[in-house]
Image (tube, grey):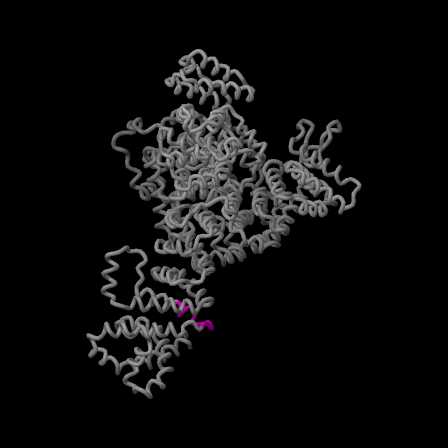
Amino acid sequence: MEPSPVKGKPQGRLLVSTTLDAKDELEERLERCVGIVTSLMNGLSEREANDVLTAHVCKGSQQHEEVCLGLFTLLLTEPPQAQRCYRDLTLVNRDGMNVVLIKINQILMEKFLKLQDVCRTQLVWLVRELVKSGVIGADGVLMTLMKQIAGGDISNKNLWLAENVLDILVDQREWVLKSGMLIAMSVYTYLRLIVDHHGTPQLLALRQKEVDFCVGLLREKFMDCFIIGRDLVRLLQNVARIPEMEQLWRDLLHNPQALSPQFTGVLQLLTSRTSRKFLACRLTPDMETKLLFMTSRVRFGQQKRYQDWFQRQYLSTADSQSLRCDLIRYICGVVHPSNEVLSSDILPRWAIIGWLLTTCTSNVAASNAKLALFYDWLFFNPEKDSIMNIEPAILVMHHSMKPHPAITATLLDFMCRIIPHFYPPLEGHVRQGVFNSLNFIMEKRVLAHLAPLFDNPKLDRELRSMLRDRFPEFCSSPSPPVEGERGIKMEESVSLEMDNHVLDKEDGCYDNTEAAFSDDEEEPNNKGKKREFRFHPIKEAYIDEPADITPFVDQLDDTLKEKVLQLQKESDTEVQCEVMQEIVDLILEEDFDSEQMSTLASCLAELFKSHFRGDVLPEEITEESLEESVCKPVCLVFRNLCQMQEDNSGFSVLLDMLAELYQKQPKIGYHLLYYLKASKAAMGKMSLYESFAQATALGDLHTCLMMDMKACQEDDVRLLCYLTPSIYSEFPDETLRSGELLNMIVAVIDSTQLQELMCHVMMGNLVMFRKDSVLNILIQSLDWETFEQYSTWQLFLAHSIPLETIIPILQHLKYKEHPEALSCLLLQLRREKPTEEMVKMVLSRPCHPEDQFTTSILRHWAAKHDDTLGEHIKALLIKNNNLPRKRQSLRSSSSKLAQLTLEQILEHMDNLRLNLSNTKHNFFTQTPILQALQHVQASCDEAHKMRFSDLFALAEEYEDSSKPPKSRRKGPTSALRSRKGAAPPASNEEESASSSASEEEDSKPKAPKRKRKGISAVGSDSD
């Protein structure tokens, strides 16, 4: 803790501060709210105080916020009043505790380390109460609180926090099980923490609680944990020797079905990339901020003092060795470079990783750190994985060869030896993954050639020989020498251009990163290109340079030039708006020279560049804050457009002005969308954007809208979510016909934003799917990242679209490739009463021993809707039993999808029979099923009769029980014929078989023999 302040400075009750610290704005505001609440409640009884508070919050949103934050602060600072304050808070709040949740998140992310001990204890107590009350959004707060549990730290405060959060998760287990993301995040967190907790009895007791918690969730909710991806295997591998974990580890490797019917094996998990959300959750907000600062602000060559500080703060103890893996996985998978940083001399990612490797003091920690660095290499798939995840490892080796050859040698040796030793049964897959990685590295020109690295004289002979044996394709020298590099595109060859600069210094500089979070799904076409979808948790640090309009301003006429220069000089926003209005008036004059439009746009783009940085959307959204956010000079153009009629000549002039400005500053597009939604002056004018899109060089609404939303997604995810309902409602034809915009959204939202979008859907504010296109969009989503697919299905299920609309997607789903869609469909089908089309689609899935989808849903329907399912299966069996040759010709002339064959139905029926064999289900005793099986048996060939003899035996047993009354009329030899007469559908079959009557007669005497064998077979089966 910080030292106590001197007497001259009053110490706040919320945060610890020193003499040098300025008074914290958040603390001041919260203390003001406490003063308001205290003055209202002073001297009143509990009931009177509650009435006064209720009356006060009804006056307006500001009063509501003041009372809620006042009670919240009293709860933190006055433990004896906590119960009463929480009760009052639940009674008087009008927004589902939203104000309090936002403030808790702010404190957790920004002020947690400065909280007084009492307040920290009370904050954890409050989170527990919010969870107990089932407050919507409490899961997000709990995940943020979990993020504060530091890895590699066994200090008393950290252990206290880990144990208290674990107690909340254990005590409120039923609530936890309702959130798939919370399940996965908590398992990921505590699997990682188990490694740190060993040695003392206190630590072992905590570890046992953590082990029991993780094993329980992994056993019960494995497919929810599956979304973690390949890093789940890495974490489990580290704890696999703990007895309770050992059996789970064995099941993971050798008996995957014990964990989940949808889980096909460890390879399925290892080929699934881990989302950045999990990689980021194991760094505290303070670590994350410091690391992002180093990768976005610190210049190469000046990093030592920052690294020393980071090491003193987080990496100085023996227990902190395990934190290095978290840092390396975070740097590889989360922090990705942009073009802007690639061309600068900012500290690169690989240099930080090299520093982390050199500071490892334990062999185990060093091995784990190297595995963390190469982990994405082992099962790398160029179609799904990102070059940015594998790039740091190759660059650490490349740039360390001259100053630190030992680092390069140990990493190359590790890369060779991990192939056979990672998991011998999957050696071929690992070898292919490493080969794919090296191939992709060369294809993307991260390095032009690998031979100088693999066959370098600085490596010892044995290592070079091993590299030649393992990777002969990459060890041959290039045949024109490496001078052809000058032909590589600028954005693809930054590393090569910077080699001389790098080697002049000790560690090198290529993989420089700004504080940008790269999306899991994206994959750049060229190595230096800006990422398609990025998420910025903190904004880039810009150096404010004065706007330079010198090249353009002299081209303007005198009047306009004067106004533009005046706009440049003014710093007051209100005055700038007045000057901008005068410029707009000049543009609208009849004698305005349109040839100056482009030059003016260049001036304005330069002058307003600061307006396009930082968050557009206010932190707290109110009518006042929204109006304030659109009071910028550039918004004057938008406002004038809104006030004009479209047939006004000035309207097209201003559109041309915006189109020119759009070419200079593409962000103007989503700023216009924001203005049209946020400003009262633009109410009902969203269609104005369509006119703008047609006026741009793109000339197309769909293209323009998608480009603007993509730019918005890269810059501000909160704004993207804010605009989403309006964009979907105003432009349904552009948004609902494809999954392009949906993919942008689900690629970057978190669980809280997903829940908010679902609420918008259910309240009728947002429609993201419609019947005519939903199937196509869901099919497109099958190639998306796991979390993106789950989010898509959650949003779909929030709509009231009948499941039959999208049931044909089953034709496209393969059990190994599409577990996300299959699991969501399975849960939804479980709630439905089966229709014939549903049953047909389910039965049309190919039979595979590992694919349990069809059997599981049929079993459920057999238990809940046996009569309905029986009738549908009977109808499908009889339909598919007619004229197999004709059916075959139809199949060849139509789509290959959804072809239901008689053999498929029988295979699925036989699987269901086996599944129900040891239960009390009487599904196969239903008359429709037995009649249909009799019908099929009478006409199918001998091969099918033999293959499905146990299934047909059920029907023959049924026939035996109905035989005595028939024999009194027609005798034993006519049993088969009388059975046909009794079953109405048999008439068609009898007509179709009239040409082979003699064959039928010959087969009749054999029927009783088959019946006797069938009955004995059924008997032995039941035994």
**Residue 98 x, y percent position in the rendering:** 60, 42
Is 534 in front, or is 629? 629
In the picture, residue 828 is in which quadrant? bottom left
**Residue 742 x, y percent position in the rendering:** 43, 43
Question: Which residue is at a point 65% across and 46% down the rendered structure image?
Answer: 126
**Residue 650 x, y percent position in the rendering:** 42, 23
Q: Which residues are magenta?
A: 912-921
Which quadrant holds the N terminus? top right
Q: Image check: 428 left or right of 629?
A: left
Q: Which residue ends up furthest to the top in the rendered image?
A: 558
Q: Image check: 952 left or right of 37?
A: left
Is 638 in front, or is 704? 638
Is residue 724 part of the magenta span, yes or no?
no
Is 420 in front, or is 865? 865
- Please say if 9 is above or below 211: above
Can residue 413 be seen at all in this image of the molecule? no
Q: Which residue ends up furthest to the bottom in the rendered image?
A: 968
- Please say if 14 is above or below 893: above
In the picture, residue 153 is in which quadrant? top right
- Please say if 840 is above or below 759: below
Is residue 914 part of the magenta span, yes or no?
yes
Question: Which residue is at a point 32% across and 37% down the rendered structure image?
Answer: 443
Q: Image check: 8 left or right of 640?
A: right
**Residue 73 x, y percent position in the rendering:** 69, 39
Question: Which residue is at a point 49% across and 53% down the rendered structure image?
Answer: 224
Give the total number of marks visible in the rendering.
Answer: 0
Can residue 651 be seen at all in this image of the molecule? yes
Is 313 in front, or is 185? 185
Which quadrant holds the C terminus? bottom left
